[in-house]
Image: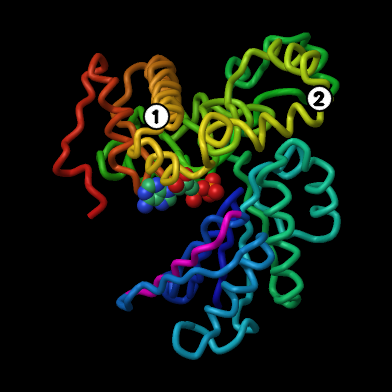
Amino acid sequence: MKILVVNAGSSSLKYQLFDMETEKALAKGNCERIGIDGVLTHKRPGKEDYKTSAPFPDHRAAIEYVLKILTDKTLGVIGSVEEIAAVGHRFAHGGERLKTSSVLGDEEIAYLESIVELNPLHGPPAISGFKACKAVMPRANHVGVFDTSYYSDLGEYAYIYPVPYELYEKYKIRRYGFHGTSHRYVAGKAAELLGRKDAKIITCHLGNGSSLSAIVGGKVVDTSMGLTPLEGVLMGTRSGDVDPAVLEYIMDNTGMDIHQMLNCLNKKSGFVGLSCSSDMRDVKAAAAKGDEQAQAALDVWTYRIQKYIGAYNVAVGGADAIVFTAGIGENDCEACAHVIEGLSFMGVKIDPAKNTRE
Ligand code: ADP
């Protein structure tokens, strides 16, 4: 049986095709810079990587291209899409109802559509990615895996907002947390490498969307995203934490309504708000050419991550490991080193020789 795993992020679509008999990946890849221009990297074990530019105006175009590549005579690994028996879709928000991985029927999709405003950046691409896959692979089983599942046991001390309690009771206004599958996986891997099941770990998922989690003995004790993925550190287009009173002040001064305001915080803030682009590589290239605003954006990014790591060092009671993952965390050794440089007070130092991509 072949299973395709699809992760439609805000600016990327990652995929991996598994042969479940061997439990090995046959191919994996990433469509990046969706909505900007479009780059596809397609990898197969033991073969040279294939990289190409292709216009990806939206996630639907990206998934269609991926299926074309997977079945291509030269680059592909399967004869036809019919071979894909099931598709696993990553969804950021499962809300109150979808707490564990679930087969996605009309009812589940209608529910996910009804809570899309809780997750305006990832929800729409994930739903359209699902619909595109469903249209091309109608006979396959489609299963949703939810980031929020990982946080369903989070303690009340961490998930309650200090606002009137009835808002939680009536409307389930609470912190849900996101990127759970990623935090769970990398924390497990780190604990395995450390050879310690009780390890205290801070995981930093730093991509276009970014979040940190504090984990003790495999159990998550805090995380930086909240009711929606807007809370936390500075991201590609999201502001992360801001004083809520700023909203009223901006709205009074600009005439924006609340929807425009939230659109601004979700889509026009973070790197793209402070600098020239939502993409770390563009921001760094601009800073390297002397663009002071781009450098300032990088400084805010670094500082806000350091503050969360400091706080989570308290949450876990002294971390054994700090883990970096996602687009920036995996690839940008220099950015991670800058974060670490500010943490020497915690006894953390970086080994420059080991901190390379290889
Ligand atoms: P998403 O939240 O859309 O899934 P990703 O995890 O793919 O995002 O991360 C996208 C971010 O990772 C972008 O800011 C991009 O610049 C950065 N990134 C990806 N590859 C590299 C690289 N090789 N070097 C530096 N930054 C990278």
Is 330 drawn above or below residue 23 in the view shown?
A: above
Is 358 drawn above or below residue 311 in the view shown?
A: below
Disc 1 marks a residue whose amino acid type is: Gln
- Which quadrant: the C terminus? bottom left
Given residues 268 and 11, the one toward you in this image is: 268
Q: Tag 1, which secondary structure?
A: helix
* Residue at point 81%, 17% (across, down): 167
87 with respect to 15 (left or right): right
Given residues 22 and 304, the one toward you in this image is: 304
In the image, residue 209 lies at what x, y percent?
Answer: 55, 40
**Which numbered dot is residue 295?**
1
* Residue at point 45%, 88% (across, down): 74
Graded by Cα atoms within 10 Å as few (under 14), some (14 to 19) or many (20 or more), the crowding at tag 1 reads many
Disc 2 marks a residue whose amino acid type is: Met
Given residues 253 and 248, the one toward you in this image is: 253
Graded by Cα atoms within 10 Å as few (under 14), some (14 to 19) or many (20 or more), the crowding at tag 2 reads some
